Image (tube, grey):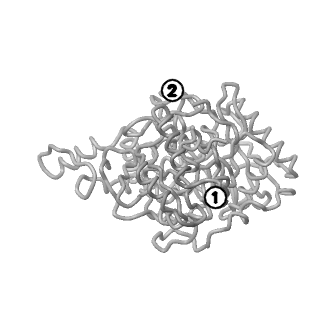
Amino acid sequence: MELCWMTVKEAREALDKGELGAGELARAILDRVEEVESRVRAYINVFPGEALETAEKVKGGPLAGIPLAIKDNICIRGLETTCASKILKGFKPPYNATVVDRLREAGYVLLGKTNLDEFAMGSSTENSGFFTTHNPWDLDRVPGGSSGGSAAAVAAGECLAALGSDTGGSIRQPAAFCGVVGLKPTYGRVSRYGLVAFASSLDQIGPITRTVEDAALLLEVISGHDPRDSTSAPYPPHKAQELLFKEVRGMVLGLPKEYFGEGLDPQVRGAVLEAVRVLESLGCRVEEVSLPHSPYAVATYYLVATAEASSNLARYDGVKYGYRAPEHKDLYDMYVKTRSQGFGVEVKRRIMLGTYALSAGYYDAYYLKAQKVRTLIKRDFEEVFRACDAVVTPTSPTPAFRMGERLADPLTMYLSDIYTISVNLAGIPAVSVPCGFTREGLPVGLQIMGRAFDEATILSLGYAYQGVTDWHKKRPPV
């Protein structure tokens, strides 16, 4: 096996046995980056010198010598963090995100920072302020978003695993498009300290990997309480073994009828239902369920998320850090020109939507009503989980679409996340697992949703499924 296609577990075992050196592994991955990066464009910055130096010095830890990539909205001290936005070009944080500190303690090797939709606002990585990442399965198609760079890097063999962030599907949807595993943990399971905020009540950091087992290994390292994050849950991290080996026989899986209606690609439907049959063969029982407020999820999300974005992005004003318009008459003019020139079209659109929703006279009609519907969506899941252990759905209604296909129609783009958004609104965990391919050779993802803080159930189901299928072992042609 080529080293660039190893799983985290395989690499860890080879390193522990002395069959492989950390420097040798890092060089092999960097060679792969050099070979394909000009076509995939997964990274905003690659740090070959630092990666090799770290690999040669690595001592111990559960991820010692494992080359990983980090989405470029997660802060790393002294290294440029741009959120793929012109307004943060050149910004170097003076501190590490908590997840980065935990990865460092575990001995990881940082390869680089991956591309994303600007400030994580998008479903295709076409909204990056710098360039678009390409899907390794078809370079004319998008990798999904906003963690498109992380998913493409894992799929193309440019790292063994990566971290992304998920506000409305930004880990799971690109994982589905790129044929890899993407885990969105329960809100509060992983510290958000050092994650550049988009929508604070929705954002969550999680792993993108080749296998469910690797996702569990990374979750063990990055999860756990953090006093620096006021929304961090007071729970210790689970061991990977606890997350993977729950008995799946006898589990009841809910199949929500709202997720299999109009707009679902027939090939995606077929692959997902075949995956459900595989889970049935493993002893699971499948029941049709209803999540009646799901049709309102997209509208709810694009009020809650944009309102929070309007507030969070007010800090980018050209005064404290990042880009400042070079020519201006006075302070107000500097604010206007800095934000006009520094933000891209989609970010401006969402700031304006959120500001409008929060404005006097419209707050009750839009933002307050959206929060009430959010509560109803959360209650739908609570009701279903009284009878079911997990809910299974497609991750995305379609496979990866062509570049430019949806840029002129924001609503169609927003509907790319119609099956993932509810999870963030409810604060529950979900994982996307590869479950097949279309006739055009494009990956399809199966989404498994669970109760809050019950990552063990969804990961055990995904692990059992990967134990009897080999979709996750397929490699892209790039």
Residue drawn at (30%, 47%) of the image: 87
- The label shown at residue 76 is none
Mark 1 residue crowding within 10 angstroms, few (<14) / some (14–19) / many (20+): few
Q: Does 76 sit left or right of 154 as displayed?
A: left
User: Of the residues shown, which amino acid type is indicated by label 2?
Assistant: Glu
Residue 405, numbered label: 2
Q: Is residue 80 above or below residue 96?
A: above
Horizontal side of 335 relative to 405 (left or right) equals left
Q: Residues within 10 Å of mark 2 (few under 14, many from 20)?
A: few
At horizontal 53% and vertical 52% (from top left) the residue drawn is: 67
What residue is drawn where x is 54% and y is 40%?
Answer: 152
Q: Is residue 429 visible?
A: no
| Residue 220 against residue 40 in the figure, above or below | below
* Relative vertical location of residue 45 with respect to residue 247 in this rendering, above or below: above
Element at badge 2? loop
Identify the secondary structure beneath mark 1.
loop
The answer to which of marks 1 and 2 sits earlier in the sequence is 1
Asked whether 40 or 377 is in front, the reply is 40
Residue 347 drawn at (x, y percent) = 39, 43
Q: The N terminus appears in which quarter of the rendering?
A: top right
> What is the residue that sits farthest to the left in this orientation?
329
> 140 above or below 156?
above
Spot occupied by residue 65 in the image (x, y as percentages of width and height): 55, 58
Say which amino acid is labelled 1. Answer: Gly
Q: Which residue is mark 1?
A: 18
Res 342 → quadrant: top left
Which quadrant does the C terminus fall into? top right
